[in-house]
Image: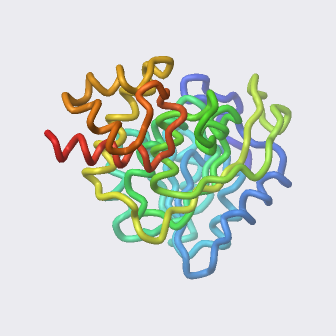
Amino acid sequence: MPSLHTRARKRFGQHFLIRPEIGERIIDLAQLEPDQNALEIGPGRGALTGRLAERANQLLLIEIDRDLAAELRQRHAANPSVRIVEADVLRIDLEEELREVAPVTVVANLPYNISTPLITRLVEWPQLYRRMVLMLQREVAERICAPPGGRDYGSLSVAVQLAAKPRIHFSVPPSAFRPAPKVDSAVISIEPFEKPLLSDAERQAVRRLTRGLFSQRRKQMGKLLRSQSKNAAAILEKLNIDPQRRPETLAPDDFVQITRLIEDNA
């Protein structure tokens, strides 16, 4: 069935997948069982949607483009297990939308301009998803999976790695999309830990701390932490962290311990 419009809309960051074999690899990585539910974010022209509808028990589609949403409704009108929500995924109450189908497997070819805020939001609710298989900008994928010590490691790395295990599976060239983006993409999986490491309040507190610290990543921890706590020196000493170290050298759990001591001494 042809699309209702053929040109990608720049304001939505649309780059449509045109290589079926890459879609198959993504679906295989989703590892969907017949009794499991799925969420596809930004299905676009449906390069992945038909295969997901065949495999999932219930499939929720969230599409911001009204023309594409209308086409998806028409295409899947005979399938009661497919539900389409026409909305901006960054603005809707995702927890409410998923209430009756969670946990879901999230599959998406993400627009580059929403990948970081969306992933940050998704990992705040690890109980809502079983796993995520996402195609996104290669640079963002490397930031998500980066270990401590390098320039790619930052607050996004910490946020994801405290909630789940991320892994890069393969790269995707610009030629796999129409229109072709200017950068390479990558497909990653993000699998939540069976038992959450942090409470919701702790997760938010760590996120605030790391955003502040990594916004000035070239500065040393001794100086940075003084803006967060009057007990900065004592906290670093208790955790045996050299105040001359920079944020990028600390492991995710170090930020958890720092956050807890700040809260204890508030």
Image location (x, y in percent) of residue 86: 44, 46
- Quarter in which the C terminus is drawn: top left
Taking the image as shown, residue 231 lies to the left or right of residue 73, namely left
Taking the image as shown, residue 106 lies to the left or right of residue 212, namely right
Return the residue nearer the eye: 14 or 132.
Answer: 132
Q: Which residue is drawn at 71% across and 63% down?
A: 29
Q: Can residue 4 be seen in this view?
A: no
Image location (x, y in percent) of residue 33: 63, 78
Classify 85 as above or below 180.
below
Q: Which residue is drawn at 52% across and 59% down?
A: 39
Image location (x, y in percent) of residue 7: 69, 28
Image location (x, y in percent) of residue 151: 62, 27
Q: Looking at the image, which residue sits at the far bottom?
A: 35
Q: Residue at x 78, y 28 (%)?
A: 180
Q: Can residue 153 be seen in this view?
A: yes
Callout count = 0
Q: Looking at the image, which residue sits at the far left?
A: 266
Taking the image as shown, residue 174 lies to the left or right of residue 218, namely right
Taking the image as shown, residue 167 lies to the left or right of residue 68, namely right
Classify 168 as above or below 100.
above
Return the residue nearer the eye: 236 or 55.
Answer: 236
